[in-house]
């Protein structure tokens, strides 16, 4: 069975933390890993850079990494980026014989009940939860039941399942955040070596994330 992993986010800007996680997912055996920049996020602040700039930075970041691709579904769709709409479109295109896997951090997973039509998500895709320091699975409540009913034991098993399962996976998480990068730039400091050189050059060329004086 073909397996696709989808890693969404604002990528504002994309950095080595995003890219390292995506690359490790390719090493978990997924046939394809897609980075999907959102257009207008629902549960986060509006991105500082427009969708096209964030897409162009992603292009620069992955141009020499053939295992990673960029998916424009959310950028090309107008309005807010609801995950259930994106997965519905992907499932319609891919059919039901493909393992479609939504990648999310533990914090996002625990907040899933706040998402639009969140219970439909698991009927469209599997969920791969990336374990993050400081977040643990709940011992009771809605998400504990949701997880216990759908838990599967390994990435290998979930790659053979089209949808409906949840797995928790450890990745080597780098202590880098887009928030930190933007803060450095607002202060007039350098963010070099936190993101690909080509992305850094793009930010410098376009004077992104600086305070307007």
Image (cartoon, grey):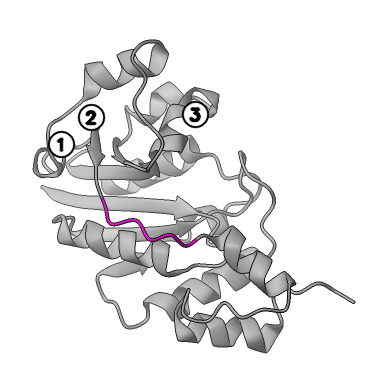
Bounds of the magenta segment: 171-176
Depth check, mark 1 against mark 3: the one in front is 3
- In the image, farthest residue toward the right: 213
Residue where numbered disc 3 is placed: 111
Residue at (27% x, 44% y) in the render:
100
Q: Is residue 70 visible?
A: no
Residue at (26% x, 52% y) in the render:
171
Q: Is residue 7 visible?
A: yes
Residue at (24% x, 70% y) in the render:
67
Mark 1 / mark 3, whichever is N-terminal: 3
80 to 211, vertically: above or below: above
Is 97 on the left or on the right of 171, as rendered? Answer: left
Depth check, mark 2 against mark 1: the one in front is 2
Circle 2 residues within 10 Å: few <14, some 14–19, many ≥20? many
Q: CA distance from mark 3 to mark 2?
A: 17 Å
Residues at discs 1 and 3 in contact (Cβ within 8 Å): no
Image location (x, y in percent) of residue 24? 24, 61
Q: Residue 161: give its label.
A: 1
Q: CA distance from mark 1 to mark 3?
A: 24 Å
Q: Residue 165: give its label.
A: 2
């Amino acid at each position: 069975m073909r397996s696709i992993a989808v890693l969404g986010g604002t990528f504002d800007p994309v950095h080595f933390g995003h890219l390292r996680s995506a690359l490790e997912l390719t090493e978990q055996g997924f046939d394809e890993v897609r980075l999907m920049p959102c257009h207008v996020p629902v549960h986060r602040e509006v991105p500082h850079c427009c969708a096209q700039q964030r897409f162009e930075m992603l292009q620069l970041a992955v141009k020499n990494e053939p295992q990673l691709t960029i998916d424009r579904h959310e950028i090309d769709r107008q309005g807010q980026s609801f995950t259930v709409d994106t997965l519905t479109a992907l499932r319609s295109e891919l059919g039901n014989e493909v393992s479609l896997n939504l990648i999310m951090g533990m914090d996002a997973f625990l907040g899933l009940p706040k998402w639009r039509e969140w219970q439909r998500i698991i009927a469209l895709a599997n969920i791969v939860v990336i374990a993050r320091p400081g977040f643990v699975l709940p011992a009771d409540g809605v998400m504990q039941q949701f997880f216990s009913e759908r838990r599967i034991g390994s990435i290998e098993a979930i790659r053979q399942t089209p949808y409906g399962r949840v797995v928790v996976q450890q990745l080597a998480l780098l202590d880098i955040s887009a928030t930190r990068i933007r803060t450095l730039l607002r202060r007039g400091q350098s963010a070099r070596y936190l993101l690909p050189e080509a992305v850094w050059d793009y930010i410098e060329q376009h004077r992104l994330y600086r305070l307007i004086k």
